[in-house]
Image (spheres, rainbow, N blue to C red):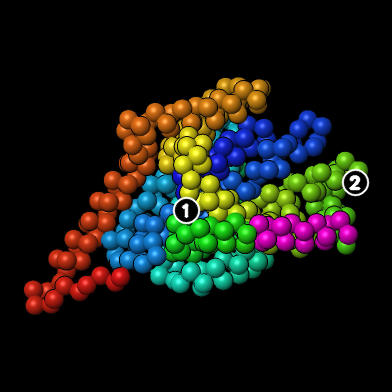
Amino acid sequence: MDAARGLALVGMFSVHAYGAFAADGSPTPAWMFAGGRSAATFALLAGVGLAFTTGGRRPVVDRGTRAAIATRALLVGLAGLLLGLASRTAGLDVDVILVFYALLFLCALPLLRLHPRTLIGLALFLAVAGPVLVHLLRDVLPMPSYDGDPTPADLFTDPLGLLSDLLVHGNYPVLAWTAYVCAGLAAGRLDLTSRRVAKRLLAGGLALAAGAWLAATLLLRWFGGLWHLWRAEFTDTPWPEARNEVLWDAPDGATWWSLISRAPHSTSPFDMLHTLGSAAALLGAVLLLTRHAPGRTALAPLAAAGSMPLTLYCAHVLFLATGALEDSPDLLCAALVAGALLFAMCWRRTAGRGPLEALVAAAAGRARRAALGRDATSLSPTEPDKPQSA
């Protein structure tokens, strides 16, 4: 889990350092390999983490558990709003994901007791139907009045716009992205120490990712989809120069043709299924690699970074907001990756859990104890204490 999150962090750092397109209009290698996939991996692993904190293979979901998850979501959302303020002030093009994560955590609360097979079916359904629903609601829900990442002020000045941004208009629309959390919950309810489970995650994920990519490519290149998508969404750029843009830039979603895009963050069924498979395959591959001592040793720095993703994510956004090294993407990426790995290894060796992770865990623990305490005191003296659901 930690090593997979560490790899996703490195991918996210590279995308933010290099951007989507080079000066000649071609997509950067960082965008082609990590664009969309890193964020999807984080969302899927968030589901795995929720499964772990609610009993793993034997779910234990009570009021205390729900209170802890809700508290965690609120604190993550608050951190996202504060980062949005820094991002908007600095004029960054980062698309802070934490506020979306917070709503994903809350949406996962009714799903915690579901069977893994049900969760897998729901994940696949949402990956296909979610983008269609998002497309249908684009013209129904209002656009947010703000431009860029949401900030604490938007909670009061434009609450409906903020909600529609999180559900539909943002880069991580929760109506579709809940698919990743469902898949992660399903994976977390399995025996992830099993080699067979890891192999199935790897093979199934690769098959899903390759199948979605191949289907989208056939529609785009062989059935005229590329030209139709350009006519519908990208006519501001002449056709010969627009080819890379159409293939790799997310459309606005103004027409139904946007649903055949395979571009990162296009939130089309093909993008959702491809990134869902990629995230599952990455998790399976890392599970297999870390079964052996050499693999665990090689991935130890990434595992250290992945054990404190909230801390490092917030730190990297704040570093980007300073504008340091923005004209040198190679140095910027190297500084972000090396700084994150070194800090994580030193902090984990000396202090253990990341600073923000410790803060959130402490608050979630207090919320859990308070909720369970209220349950206990709310029972009448003659009513026996009911056992928790196992």
Residue 213 colored in magenta in the image: yes
Magenta segment boundaries in residue numbering? 206-222
- Is 243 situated left or right of 12 in this image? right
- Front of the two marks 1 and 2: 1
Image position of 119 with respect to 35: above or below:
below
Task: Residue 375: tell me if it is visible.
Answer: yes
- Foreground residue among 378 and 292: 292
Task: Give the residue pinned by disc 1.
Answer: 46
Which comes before the other along the chain, label 1 or label 2?
1
Percent from the top left, x then y, of residue 90? 56, 30
Percent from the top left, x then y, of residue 143? 61, 54
Callout 1 amino acid: Ala
Asked if disc 1 and disc 2 are in contact, CB closer than 8 Å, the reply is: no
- Is 131 situated left or right of 166 in this image? right
Label placed on residue 179:
none
- Foreground residue among 6 and 380: 6
- Foreground residue among 214 and 326: 214
Q: Residues within 10 Å of mark 2 (few under 14, many from 20)?
A: some
Label placed on residue 239:
2
- Is 285 situated left or right of 193 in this image? right
